């Protein structure tokens, strides 16, 4: 099955080994950055490519 476009809080928390409340905080920060670029965002979710680009410097999970 192909990966979904958005990551939910539990995926972010697991990927970064942080708590879910902290993952929500990170998602809000990243979504704010996307809003500044003119993107439409969904609360509690983050674009998978943008997430990996910001945290790992690439568009894909290694």
Image: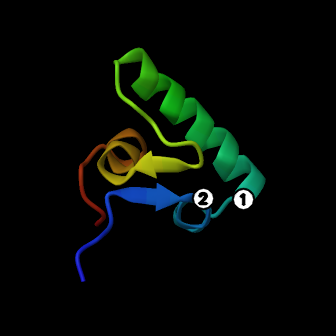
The x and y percentages for residue 34 are: 41, 27
The x and y percentages for residue 45 are: 51, 50
Q: Residue at x 30, y 63 (%)?
A: 61
Query: In the picture shown, does residue 38 fall above or below 43?
Result: above
- In screen coordinates, is 41 left or right of 48? right
Q: Residue at x 25, y 48 (%)?
A: 58
The answer to which quarter of the image holds residue 62 is: bottom left
The answer to which quarter of the image holds residue 53 is: top left
Q: Earlier in the sequence, mark 1 or mark 2?
A: 2
> How far, Cα to Cα, is label 1 from label 2?
6 Å
| The N terminus sits in image quarter | bottom left
The x and y percentages for residue 35 are: 44, 22
The x and y percentages for residue 18 are: 68, 59
Identify the element where label 1 is drawn: helix
Number of the label disc, if any, that sits on residue 46: none
Which residue is at the far bottom? 1
Identify the element where label 2 is drawn: helix
Q: Residue at x 76, y 52 (%)?
A: 21
Query: In the picture shown, does residue 31 fall above or below 21?
Result: above
Query: In the picture shown, does residue 37 fall above or below 12?
Result: above
Which residue in the structure is indicated by mark 2?
9
């Amino acid at each position: 099955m192909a990966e979904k476009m958005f990551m939910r809080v539990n995926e972010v928390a697991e990927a970064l080994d942080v708590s879910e409340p902290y993952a929500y905080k990170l998602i809000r920060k990243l979504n704010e950055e996307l809003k500044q670029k003119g993107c439409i965002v969904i609360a509690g979710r983050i674009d998978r490519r943008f997430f990996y680009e910001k945290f790992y410097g690439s568009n894909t999970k290694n």
